[in-house]
Amino acid sequence: MELNSIKPAAGSKHAKRRVGRGIGSGLGKTAGRGHKGQKSRSGGYHKVGFEGGQMPLQRRLPKRGFKSMTLKYNAEITLSALTLLGSPEVDMLALKQAGLVGQMTKVVKVVKTGELSIAVKLTGIGATAGARVAIEAAGGSLA
């Protein structure tokens, strides 16, 4: 393969539509805009969601719920995931390297799902009340 012989795949490139270039092009005169009206004029258009003066959908519908912006920084990990990790000492960095939590995660909490069969020392990681009891029962600790 030479650089001068490289070509795009057949059919992947096509000529740009040239509007307003005469009757023979098929897109002359009004250039595909039709006759009259706001959409035919230069600079004449409406904002996204505008419904001709009717109350827009996003304002007709009631506001409902709340989505926290800090949710993307929080993560949960189960007791069974800690068992699979198999490390006696677990911190945020170990969880990120194992791929159990996202790289953007700042707060991790252990939840009581599954069983914990090894003693684990957690540093910088929270736990629910039930998970705390299970960790301490297995001989682990939270710091």
Image (cartoon, rainbow, N blue to C red):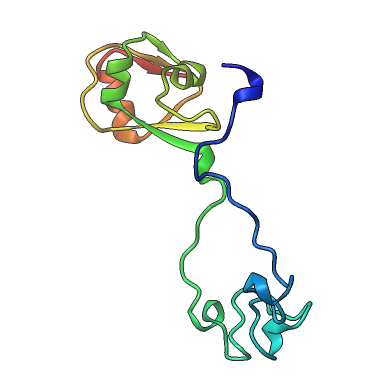
- Residue 101, located in which quarter of the rendered image? top left
Q: Is residue 81 left or right of residue 1?
A: left
Q: Residue at x 52, y 80 (%)?
A: 57
Q: Residue at x 47, y 17 (%)?
A: 97
* Front residue of this view, candidates 21 and 39: 21
- Across and down, in percent, residue 117 comes to 22, 15
- Residue 142, located in which quarter of the rendered image? top left
Q: Is residue 80 left or right of residue 102?
A: left
**In the orientation shown, which residue stands out farthest toward the top?**
88
Q: Residue at x 74, y 70 (%)?
A: 21
**In the orientation shown, which residue stands out farthest toward the right?**
43
Q: On screen, 48 above or below 53?
A: above
Q: On screen, 16 above or below 116?
A: below
- Across and down, in percent, residue 30 comes to 70, 81
- Across and down, in percent, residue 134 comes to 26, 24
Q: Is residue 74 left or right of residue 42?
A: left
Q: Is residue 139 left or right of residue 104?
A: left
- Across and down, in percent, residue 70 comes to 56, 45
